[in-house]
Image (cartoon, rainbow, N blue to C red):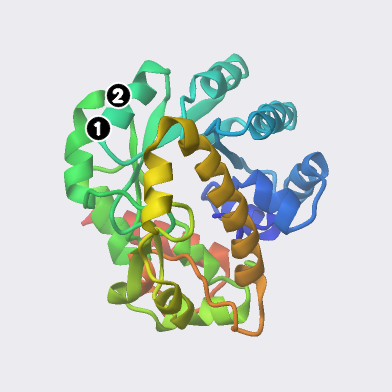
Amino acid sequence: MYPCSNPELVAAVSEAGGIGIVQPISLTYVHGHEYREGLRLIRRLTSRPVGLNALIESSSRRYHERMVRWVAVAIEEGVRFFVTSLGNPRWVVDAAHAAGGKVYHDVTERKWALKALDAGVDGFIAVNDRAGGHAGPRDPEALLAELADLDRPVVCAGGVGAEADFVRALALGYAGVQMGTRFIATTECRAGEPYKRAILEADADDIVLTERITGVPVAVINTPYIQRMGTKAGPLARWLLRQPRTKKWMRTAYALRSVWQLKRSSLDESGAKDYWQAGRSVAGIHAVEPAGEIVRRFAAAAEAARRQ
């Protein structure tokens, strides 16, 4: 949930019975906390488990070394659940398992799940075509069908904005759901009010994919800024992203720009910087509410469906 996962939001989700996920760059660069002290702040706000998002792509050695330190400190501070993405999670798996932890890996297709399985992950976060940010190519049903025989819990990521979406995902056979967009429209989230309002006003058809932010498709709200910028990367950028010698450099450049743009736009209160990530779950989001109320309402809906 970069950049929206501030400590108060993470803690509120966990305190209500979900598991809030810390995003290290959000914690430090966006919200200004020293990393270890930020984790301790969350622990003061809730005694319940929290997780850590370890984005493990290795295009930058400096970034990789920093992530290794972040994972080590998280383990020292009692974190035992990790969500990994964009790389081989073996080193996170080894560190987490040594401390009795679990690792779930983001996957968009079966081939990535098989690689993660070889690395020893404990479960999968199945990122479907309704997700915000870097969405996958499969719908929730098709993606679950690809992963169902791999003997690991599968969590649905994308398209869950209302209780009915949650109940439906569980009925399909998912072990749980991962929600991002729904928790941006909460009282605890520090995202700007224009961003929250845009989520409330958007429908599923207002979500588009753009290559102009990170070089690969990202799901965003189709604002005037996105319309002016366009959704396709230029021919030179596409060529450089395909070349082995320039691919990592281009991805690093895109990532640095995206980190800055997202921080600036997501926290802006003027509404002028309207670059806002969101998934198609906006269709079911109609109010800004406390995160704990959302978690408890979803849990109640699942329990009611189980009893029927």
Could you tell me how far apart the alpha carbons at marks 1 and 2 are, in whole angstroms?
A: 6 Å
Q: Is residue 112 visible?
A: yes
The residue identified by callout 1 is: 110
Q: Which residue is mark 2?
A: 114
Q: How many marks?
A: 2
Res 204 quadrant in image: bottom left
Residue 229, image quadrant: bottom left
Q: Write the residue at 66% across / 35% down.
A: 63
Nearer to us in this view, 168 or 25 = 25
Residue 30: where, in percent of width, then height? 71, 58
Examine the rendered structure and indicate whether residue 267 appears above or below residue 42: below
Horizontal side of 44 relative to 108 (left or right) equals right
Which labelled disc corresponds to residue 197? none
Quadrant of the rendering where the N terminus is positioned: bottom right
User: The disc labelled 1 sits on which kind of residue?
Assistant: Arg
Residue ID at (60%, 19%): 95
Q: Which residue is at a point 80% across and 51% down the rendered structure image?
A: 33
